[in-house]
Amino acid sequence: MDTTSSHREIPMKCDECGGENPVIHLTEVEDNETRTLHLCAECAEARGVHGTPVPENFLLAGVLAQIEGSGTKVNPGPGSEGSGSGRCDFCGLTIRGFKESGRLGCPHCWSTFEGQLRPLLHRVQGAVQHVGKVYLPPDPSASEREKRLEGLRRKLDRAVDLEDFERAAELRDQIRSIRKAAT
């Protein structure tokens, strides 16, 4: 299994000053808009943002090594004897391979190594279930408004074709009114 990346990494720059190697990666959520800022230490300090910088080459493998060294017990999961010899039947990844790379080989690895992964995920993320973003359903009135505008545009085109300019002006004003109300 090849774990090398096929894309060339582009050096990241600080979003504030343009300097090299930002050390703070801040995600701001405001009015359901998400924005990620990459800040160097100086710009982060100027914004009052403090935190433990995450190394550019951070891998889960480092966290695993810390857990192993701390005496934290990790329960072996199905397909594992707990000695690092468990193997995914689908891709062949071993728990030892996961600990070295910090990456699972395939979706089936979760089933194979679940016993080891659950406590680890709980410790690293504070939960074992990914919640993700919550998306708002589309506004039904917006699609109704678009249908109405489409109908008015067709009527406007027809009125212009028939040279009924008074009717065309009325339709144009209705379209403007609906657009203005939508903003």
Image: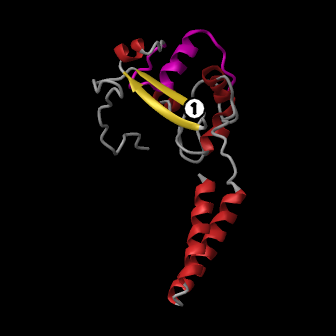
Which residue is rendered at x = 63% and y = 62% of the image?
178
The answer, for residue 165, to whether it is visible in the render is yes
Q: How is colour applied across the structure in the image?
A: secondary structure
Q: Relative to 141, is 106 above or below?
A: above
The foreground one among 63 and 43 is 43
| Residues shaded magenta | 51-76
In the image, taking residue 18 as reference, residue 29 lies left or right, namely right
Which residue is rendered at x = 30% and y = 41% of the image?
8
Secondary structure at badge 1 equals strand
Across and down, in percent, residue 132 comes to 64, 38
Q: Quadrant of the N terminus?
A: top left
Magenta-span inclusion, residue 66: yes
Which residue bears the numbered disc 1? Answer: 30
Q: Amino acid at mark 1?
A: Glu
Across and down, in percent, residue 30 comes to 57, 32
Res 43 → quadrant: top left
The foreground one among 10 and 39 is 39
The foreground one among 83 and 98 is 98
Across and down, in percent, residue 96 comes to 52, 28
Outermost residue on the front side: it is 166
The number of discs equals: 1
Outermost residue on the bottom side: it is 162
Magenta stretch secondary structure, dominant: loop
Which residue is rendered at x = 37% and y = 40% of the image?
4
Q: Residues within 10 Å of mark 1 (few under 14, many from 20)?
A: few
Q: Relative to 148, is 126 above or below?
A: above
Which residue is rendered at x = 53% and y = 14% of the image?
66
Magenta-span inclusion, residue 172: no
Across and down, in percent, residue 70 comes to 58, 9
The answer, for residue 81, to whether it is visible in the render is no
Res 125 → quadrant: top right
